[in-house]
Image (cartoon, grey):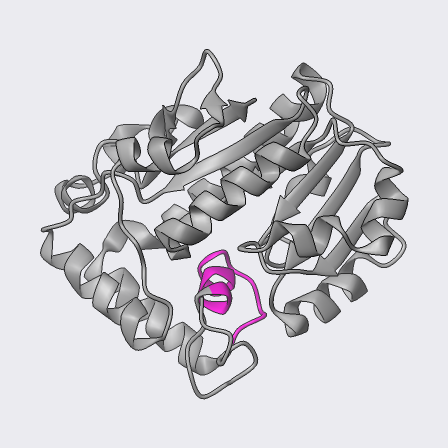
Amino acid sequence: MSQENIANSAKPNPGRMYDYLLGGHHNFEVDRVAAEQLKALAPFAAKAPKLQRWCLQDLAVELTEKRGYDIIIDFASGLPTQDHIHEAVPDGTTVIYSDYDPVTVEYACEILQGTPNVYFFQGDARHPEALLNRPEVQDILKDRRDVALVYWGVTAFFTDAELVSVAQYLHQWADPKSCWAFNAQLADVGLTDPGVVRATKLYEQMGSPLRLRTLEEYQTLTQPWRPDEKGFIPFMDWHGIDRSEMGEEDLRAFGVAGGGYGAYLTK
């Protein structure tokens, strides 16, 4: 994730492209043009952000109503619009969002103004210690570490070393009862598919190169965390999407998993 084009309207930004594909308005013309190019290269790319957001809603319900967590810390959140986590959790749940983009943070704070128990701070998901050690966050947590941590739709932008560092720090920081909702983003996509190759080059040109991995590689990089009994769930199964929505081009590019997997990682 390149820091140099955060608020640069002359260069496309993956976060703003994501917002556009979700139907949002926090984007520039350069982002819309790049997003349309991406859709032309990989048609399912238009559906993937919405599938990601649906999965976020699923995990919000799972973490709170089924697993009993009343604090969720979400990293690399993007704008808290389009049915984000706080809209799917029970009243009284504390949600801490973060994003490395100062423009997103400022706009998000305006959107959330007056929303009880929901907070938004600036923080780079590659360095979770910066967010977790903020005095404001520590004041909210009050020494509690039995929380749900969320990394969704961002890990393909991390280097291997960055992902290892994140996993090890969170494992050391978190209470044994904590859970890490983790997205193995773009795992097992068609690496030789022409559309994927062209899309990867597009992100490289934007200064935000993608690291495409296998699921096995993600599992190795996130140790010592381990998935619960559900294991890594393909996106298509996670939300119950009808596979008939994926054409032959989609299946070749995004694979039968639908562009990645999700898992509840435990200590």
Residue 251 appears in which quarter of the rendering?
Answer: top left
Q: Is residue 195 left or right of residue 227?
A: left
Q: Is residue 15 left or right of residue 250?
A: right
**Whole-percent x and y of residue 220?**
34, 33
Looking at the image, which residue is at 66% across and 74% down? 103
Q: Is residue 10 magenta?
A: no
Q: Is residue 116 visible?
A: no
Residue shown at the point (64%, 45%) measured from the top left = 74
How many numbered marks, from 0 up? 0
Residue 22 belongs to magenta span: yes
Q: Quadrant of residue 25?
A: bottom right
**Residue 164 appears at what percent x and percent y?**
44, 44
* Span highlighted in magenta in the image: 15-27
Quick one: quadrant of the N terminus? Answer: bottom left
Residue drawn at x 28%, y 61% is 39
Say if 1 sits above or below 227 in the image: below
Closer to the camera in the image, 177 or 73: 177
Q: Position of residue 223 (x, y in %)?
A: 43, 31
